[in-house]
Amino acid sequence: MTQTADLTLDEMRLSLAPAVAEAAIFDGWTDAAVATAAHDAGVDADVAQLVYPGGAMDMIGAWIETIDNAMAAALPQDTLAAMKVRERIRALVQFRLDAVTGQEEALRRALAIMAMPQNAAASLRTGWRSADIMWRLSGDTATDYNHYTKRTILAGIYGATLAVFIGDESDGKAETRAFLDRRIDGVMRFEKAKAKWFSPDRERFSVTRLLGRLRYPAR
């Protein structure tokens, strides 16, 4: 079995990330958290400091990537195929919430850092990547504008749900679960309405037909 100390820096980036997140509960997303994670993993502290050259955002990005990878491994397309679309999305988002349960303080600090103006672009890319993975696991193959709207909407749902999750002290995070269900239901209603509106069977608006009716009204 490969020891953490034998990994490349890129491999160590993901290997240490969960432990860094755990340490961030107390130390924040700082070099101190990396040092704690390195000590626990038996990695030289000086080597560990080279793993996240971008500082906090690199640490947070690696943590999120490990969650993305764990989600994809636990809920592959074959597993999700038997579910309805809303159930697939709900299962994927819930997996992510379960993965960070107990690390709410680390998450709160991470979101505060990601919300800083200088981190806006990186945060958007990170959120988009996670939303894209969720939709792909759900079997989405859209390549038109729906590809972008679906991911934008899901990223918004996930972000809003995380905000509720952080402060949710109800049993089993019941408030968060209810909030997530409401948001997904709302999106599904919107998707159904949109599909109906843009259905090829729907009589499309025609300027020529309208002008013809104005000129030659039905008797």
Image: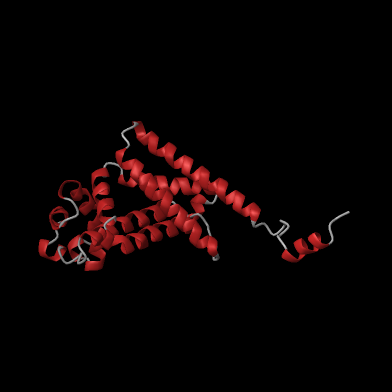
Hey, which residue is sitting farthest right in the picture?
A: 219
Please give the name of the residue rendered at 44% of the width and 55% of the height, measured from the top-left corner: 134
- Is residue 62 in view? no
Instruction: Measuring from the top left, give residue 154's x and y in whole percent.
Output: 45, 53
**70 or 161: nearer the viewer:** 161
Q: Is residue 194 left or right of residue 14?
A: right
* Quadrant occupied by the N terminus: bottom left
Please give the name of the residue rendered at 40% of the width and 60% of the height, measured from the top-left corner: 128
In this picture, is 91 found above or below 131? above
Q: Is residue 176 left or right of residue 166?
A: right
- Is residue 113 in view? yes
**204 or 209: nearer the viewer:** 209
Please give the name of the residue rendered at 37% of the width and 50% of the height, measured from the top-left corner: 159
* Quadrant occupied by the C terminus: bottom right
Q: How is the image coloured?
A: secondary structure
Instruction: Measuring from the top left, give residue 186's x and y in whole percent.
Output: 52, 44
**77 or 55: nearer the viewer:** 55
Hey, which residue is sitting farthest front in the picture?
A: 215
In this picture, is 170 found above or below 183? above
Quadrant hosting residue 11: bottom left
Instruction: Measuring from the top left, give residue 204's x and y in whole percent.
Output: 71, 60
Please give the name of the residue rendered at 49% of the width and 62% of the height, measured from the top-left corner: 148
**46 or 206: nearer the viewer:** 206
Quadrant hosting residue 133: bottom left
Q: Is residue 108 left or right of residue 138?
A: left
Instruction: Measuring from the top left, give residue 103's x and y in whole percent.
Output: 26, 44
